[in-house]
Image (cartoon, helix red, strand yellow):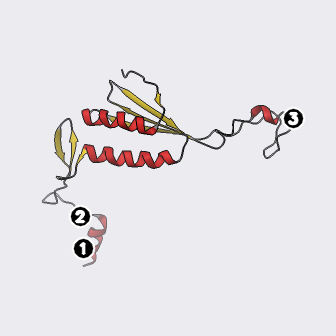
Amino acid sequence: SAVSMPYFDTWEEFVVAAQALFEASPHRCRLVTKYRPAASKPRSKGQKAGAGAGAGGAVNQRPAAEAGQGQLVVKVTDDAQCLKYKTTKRVDLKHLEKFSVWVIGLTTDRSRGSVVTDGAAVHKKRERGAGHRPSGAQRRRAKKQ
């Protein structure tokens, strides 16, 4: 089982460690993301929706830093090591997108149009030959002719 590690403090530290892990064994690593939407503000018993913060309203309020923000958790693991990063910043979504593109580029051999799996290239070209079946639209056009 994977050894749990604490969350990284900055995106930059996480990416450096994650890239090293992916480069060491791209066929064993995986990138996992989890988004937890912001929880709705809990209401006290008897409080109506849209009611202002009354005498008991301040008890159930969350801190301003958490209000309305979801949480993104990014994990990279090779089953021996587990790297984690947690954030509520929207700018980190763009960082995650760039990192995901890098991971796809690393695990895909673009020069031959193949995918790397266990160190061997598996070609993903679809042969259009004797076994090709026309699509539904192609069959309908052929009937009309």
* Residue farthest to the bottom, as pictured: 145
* Residue wearing tag 2: 134
The Cα–Cα distance between marks 1 and 2, rounded to whole angstroms, is 10 Å
Q: Secondary structure at mark 1?
A: helix
Q: What amino acid does circle 1 point to?
A: Ala
Q: Residue 142 got which mark? A: 1
Mark 2 vs mark 3: which is more N-terminal? 3
Looking at the image, how many numbered discs can be counted on the residues? 3
User: Does dot 3 land on a helix, a strand or a loop?
Assistant: loop
Q: Is residue 120 left or right of residue 54?
A: left
Q: Quadrant of residue 26?
A: top left
Q: Are marks 2 and 3 in contact (CB under 8 Å)?
A: no
Instruction: Report if the CB atoms under discs 3 and 1 are less than 8 Å apart.
Output: no
- Per the image, the residue denoted by label 3 is 55
The reply, left or right, for residue 78 in relation to residue 73 is left
Choose top left, top right, bottom left or bottom right for residue 118.
Answer: top left
Q: Which residue is drawn at the image coordinates 50% and 48% (left, top)?
A: 91
Q: Position of residue 144 (x, y in %)?
A: 28, 77
